[in-house]
Image (tube, rainbow, N blue to C red):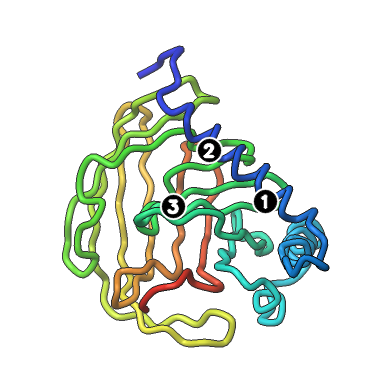
Amino acid sequence: MKSSRHRTPGWCGRCAAALACVTLLSACSSDSGDDWSAMWDVASTSWHARDAPVALEEAAAIPYATLGIRLDGGQEHILVLARDNDGEQLWLSSTKVAITTVNGRVARTSGFDTDLTGYSATEGQRADWTKPHSYSWIGDFADLGYYSVPVTCKDSPAGPDSITILGKAFDTIRVDESCLSEALNWSFTNTYWVGASGRVWRAITHFHPKGPTLETQILRPPLGND
């Protein structure tokens, strides 16, 4: 699956454009009524000086949808939703870390030591989480020189599992996802906690054969039900 071509250069351009946009917004004066500057101050401090879990007051200080992330069980950091397009969501930090999720699954990353640089689902992307189903995708791993790598997964609902985020309880279903890429000799298991509407509130996932374990949770959800 090695190739010198990158299948998805457009995402990098869109991510850079979004980063440039929020950087400009963060420079706006509060006199204009724009609170992006204060928001990015909170997010930036959270990323650089984190020595404790994200607190309720920190998340509440950001008036936009936010995602908490951890790498390999480390301290939690905050990303802010920059774009939401029919289930594809781009989350950014002021330190140029970016994650795209598609219906709750990590689809692309930027700014980590190892990144998932391309993604396309081929089966089961919008399947009912409450029922066992297959899910498959193809990914690009530019640092390894591998592109269009197929990954196949089996999703198995494990039953109701209540979780708590920032002191609030959520009724969810836990879904265990066993995945295999024969081309990379890579197997892994993801876990998702899914609400009644299908929103993934929390997840423990793997996005790169040599990458970290990524934990995510919705701190402030986008507009919508659940």
Locate residue 60: give its quadrant.
bottom right
Residue 14 marker = 2
Q: Nearer the viewer, mark 2 or mark 3?
A: 2
Residue in the image at 44% along x and 15% along y: 5
Residue in the image at 54% along x and 41% along y: 211
Q: In 3D space, how far apart are the residues under numbered discs 2 and 1 (Cα atoms)?
A: 12 Å
Q: Which residue type does callout 1 highlight?
A: Val
Q: Residue furthest top?
A: 4
Locate residue 28: give its quadrant.
bottom right
Q: Quadrant of the N terminus?
A: top left
User: Is residue 55 left or right of 219 when viewed as pictured?
Assistant: right
Q: Which residue type does callout 3 highlight?
A: Thr
Q: In 3D space, how far apart are the residues under numbered discs 2 and 3 (Cα atoms)?
A: 14 Å
Q: Quadrant of the C terminus?
A: bottom left
Mark 2 vs mark 1: which is more N-terminal?
2
Residue 12 marker = none
* Up/down of 98 relative to 175, above or below: above
x then y, percent, for residue 89:
46, 54
* Up/down of 224 relative to 116, above or below: below
Q: Nearer the viewer, mark 3 or mark 1?
A: 1
Q: In 3D space, how far apart are the residues under numbered discs 3 and 1 (Cα atoms)?
A: 19 Å
Residue position marked by numbered label 1 in the rendering: 22
Q: Which residue type does callout 2 highlight?
A: Arg
Residue position marked by numbered label 3 in the rendering: 101
Residue in the image at 54% along x and 33% along y: 12
User: Is residue 144 left or right of 193 when viewed as pictured?
Assistant: right
